[in-house]
Image (spheres, grey):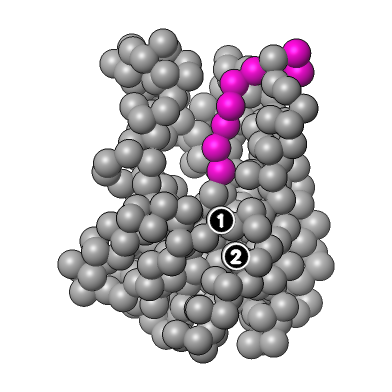
Amino acid sequence: MADRLKNKVALVLGAGSVGEGIGNGRAIAMLLAREGAQVVGVDLNLAAAEETARLVAAEGGEMLALAADVTQEGDIRRVADATLGKFGRIDILVNNVGGSIPGGPEEIAPEAWHAQFHHNLHYVYLSTRTFAPIMVRQGGGSIVNISSIAGLRHLGNELAAYAAAKAALQHFSRVVAVRYAPQGVRVNTVIPGLMFTPLVTARLAQQQAGGDAEALIAKRHARPPIGRMGDAWDVAYAVLYLASDEAKYVTGAELVVDGGLTATTR
């Protein structure tokens, strides 16, 4: 199919990539553009957002790259003004910012604990607070939040703050979905599992395997029943469905993209 998002404006928060290659946010921005959306891609690192914009343009799409710290309400409002100034509307919002630190309650300092919630949950409150009313005034829209299976299960890595924040994000999404459903704004969550993105070698190998990326990659490939990790495009296609009119009767839903991994645990 083509042009599934024709005449729609999509805002992707976290549209760059950690390390070289294509992470979830970059794949999401590229795929939404391929399907006809005009995209605004936001990242803390402007160069990362601009690289995504370059890839979108190379495929004939359109993306406005912006730098912003989306955990700051002033930056969120600046992004809203820039998007409305450029395209006049916002039909799709993808909240793709996040990140984890290892440890439990004894290892994670209070300031780091609060920072994890700020980074993984608070910004979604800020973006929803800003963009949902805009969508209501337009007559509808779609918000897709990116969570993690860490919010569903303990899968071997102690990520207490991250897991708690992602679990909270999932329930926040359900509550907000009910709030805005009568006003035509759908809110859904994509829950990725173990994905093979640049993040694995750029950050997780050091956090979880003492820098041995090869060992970590092999371990992660072996865990899902499907026999391998997924990739950024698996996440992007889930977002595309929920963002599109094909999901017009879907809200408050959670789409798990994990190769069956959470089905093997209780």
Q: Which residue is mark 1?
A: 69
| Whether residue 212 is situated above or below residue 143 in the rendered picture | above
- For the C terminus, the quadrant is top right
Residue extending furthest left?
A: 58
- Name the residue at 76% across, 71% down: 180
| Whether residue 172 is situated above or below residue 223 in the rendered picture | below
In this rendering, position of residue 213 left or right of residue 106: left
Q: Which amino acid is tagged 2?
A: Asp
- For the N terminus, the quadrant is bottom left
Q: Quadrant of residue 80?
A: bottom right
Mark 2 nearby-residue class (10 Å; few <14, some 14–19, many ≥20):
some
Asked if the residue at tag 1 contacts the one at tag 2, i.e. Cβ–Cβ closer than 8 Å, the answer is yes
- Name the residue at 42% across, 18% down: 206
Q: Nearer the viewer, residue 90 or 190?
A: 90
Mark 1 nearby-residue class (10 Å; few <14, some 14–19, many ≥20):
some
Q: Which amino acid is tagged 1?
A: Asp
Residue 100 painted magenta: yes
The location of residue 106, given as percent across then percent down, is: 75, 13
Q: Which residues are magenta?
A: 98-106
Q: Which residue is mark 2?
A: 75
**Dominant secondary structure of the residues highlighted in magenta in the image:** loop
In this rendering, position of residue 172 left or right of residue 153: right
Tell me if residue 80 can be seen. yes
